[in-house]
Amino acid sequence: MDIIIAGDGEVGLHLAEALEHSDHNITIVDPHEELLRMMESHSDLMTIAGDSTSINVLQKANVKKADMVIAVLHDEHINLLTGILAKKLGAKRVIARVNTMENIRQEAWRIYQDLGIDGIVSPEDIAAQEIVSLLKQTGATEVYDFAGGKLEMYMMKIEDKAAIVNKTLDEVQDRFKHLDFKPVAVHRRQNTFIPHGADRLMAGDMLYVISKPQAIKELMSLSGKQRYNIRNVMIIGGGRVGRITAKRLENDMDIKIIEVDKNRCMELSNTLSNTLVVNADARDVDMLEEEGIKSVDAFIAVTENTETNILTCLQAKAYGVKRTIALVENIDYIDISQNIGIDTIINKKLIAASYIVRYTLGDNVSTLKVLSGIDADIVEFVVPDGCLATMRSINRLHVPDGAIIAGIIRGEQSHIATGEFQIEADDRVVVFALPNAIKEVEKLFR
């Protein structure tokens, strides 16, 4: 594919890096010449310094031959205009990042389609939905559904006193064979690997598991986690992520938003009907005590300042809050944040990449999730008739190192992948893959 990425910073850079492992010709259009020089020195990407809403710049990027144009600048108006111009100039497909709730409504989406936009992505909206899902699965650090929840992926941090500490995977799976689950990856001390039967699980490991929904409760207890009910939620930051999260939770939970900007507080009070809005600085420890942080079940820090989010989550942990979720925009901080005790990290760059990279993988990819904290993807393929994956059982397929077939959905039935399982056309197959393996995995499902 010939792909043009219009960006203005880290989102475009991260997306380019996510796509670089595949056989795509990537051109980046960005107004920051210094950033582009840095990118050129570390990759083979083609770069053009300029404004993506300039017809001359788009023509210089050879937009008429582009299979896809992806606009992910911070300003949604620039993204939408870039997409409309690119389509008029001959681009086959255009994807635009938007930020406001107004632009993700169905009425707006229909208008953008008429103007030539093929897809919109709102990282803030997806981030809020991930937070809502996490609060419903209280023991999991990261959670994702496949095929409408028929299979689920969880990331669980193994606690010191967990029943599976120092046990090999063979021992765990033999002892708990009644559970339908498959470990697909372990993240340990900044290293991610696909585990084998003889590998031992250690305290502090982040274990990625595919399972059927009914197995999750017991799996949580094996990792040393306890399920608990969440009723009281404190959200730090009333920006788009905080506002959308509160809107989706306020009828089911007691929500309190702490926001330092007085004008934004007024807007929140007009938007939210069952949420208490407090105008205060979350870094004020005395204020947090006065607002009842000791009785909070979940603490969500989603301000525009990563350091504030990390520090306030650590403060909440010190008060005994069961669940902490932090918005961390600096990707380099993700691993550190998880290791110092924050339960879950949300990163909008990874969220945007998850949505957009899926468009580049072909029509048979129905879902792709770029995982937080590790350089890996989990992909759901719809199996076409006659592809290599249907030719023999899983244990006889040439699955590349760095990838593992985790589960299969066939009709209304879900199955955890075993070596003897035979994949059939129209199955939905969930695959975990490290970056160096994704290209070979795609070949199995073409």
Image: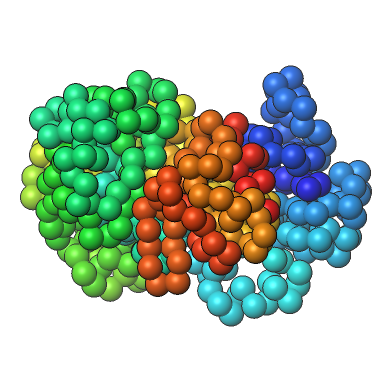
Q: At 64% from the left edge and 51% from the top edge, which residue is drawn?
A: 388
Residue 273: x and y in percent read 28, 73
Q: Is residue 288 above or below residue 150?
A: above
Residue 432: x and y in percent read 47, 43
Relative placement, left or right, of 66 versus 313 is: right
Q: Quadrant of residue 325?
A: top left
Q: Quadrant of residue 382?
A: bottom right
Q: At 74% from the left edge and 39% from the top edge, which residue is drawn?
A: 23
Q: At 81% from the left edge and 47% from the top edge, which residue is drawn?
A: 2
Q: Quadrant of residue 344?
A: top left
- Front position in the image: 305 or 322: 322
Q: Is residue 444 above or below residue 427?
A: above
Residue 172: x and y in percent read 21, 36
Q: At 60% from the left edge and 31% from the top edge, which residue is drawn?
A: 436
Residue 274: x and y in percent read 23, 71
The number of numbered discs placed on residues in the rendered structure image is: 0
Colour theme: rainbow
Q: Does the image show residue 413?
A: yes
Q: Does the image show residue 96?
A: no
- Front position in the image: 304 or 349: 349
- Front position in the image: 139 or 10: 139
Q: Is residue 377 above or below residue 383?
A: above
Relative placement, left or right, of 69 versus 56 is: left
Relative placement, left or right, of 190 versus 77 is: left
Q: Is residue 240 above or below residue 26?
A: below
